[in-house]
Amino acid sequence: MDIVRNIITVIYVINCLVLIVLCLMQSKDDEGASGAIVGGSSSSFYEKNKGRTKEGKLKRWTIILGITFVVITLVLGILYMVK
């Protein structure tokens, strides 16, 4: 059981480091209050193909790694309680 716990802990640390790097690589795309009032145009070519850009891929991987972070945290919590 200790070997499994150690392997999952190493995966957890790698996941945390990659998640930090991905969050730092993302650009700020906050429109602020003016964007909420005026609204954005979602009919442009860029908005339709946003998921294929570098920013879209970074956002997708950040979400995936965030979910795996939560899952591994719960698994490690259960493994350390079961001693």
Image: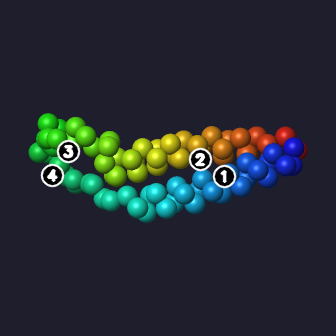
Q: Which residue is mark 3?
A: 46
The color scheme shown is: rainbow
Report x, y in % for residue 58.
Answer: 40, 51
The residue under label 4 is which amino acid type?
Ser
Locate the N terminus and report the quarter of the image it occupies.
Answer: top right
Q: Which residue is mark 4?
A: 34
Nearer to us of marks 2 and 3 is 3
In the figure, is residue 71 to the left or right of 50?
Answer: right
The residue under label 2 is which amino acid type?
Phe
Contact? badges 4 and 2 (CB < 8 Å): no
Report x, y in % for residue 54.
Answer: 34, 52
Secondary structure state at the residue bearing disc 2: helix
Secondary structure state at the residue bearing disc 4: helix
Secondary structure state at the residue bearing disc 1: helix
Q: Which residue is mark 2?
A: 69
- Quadrant of the image occupied by residue 26: bottom left
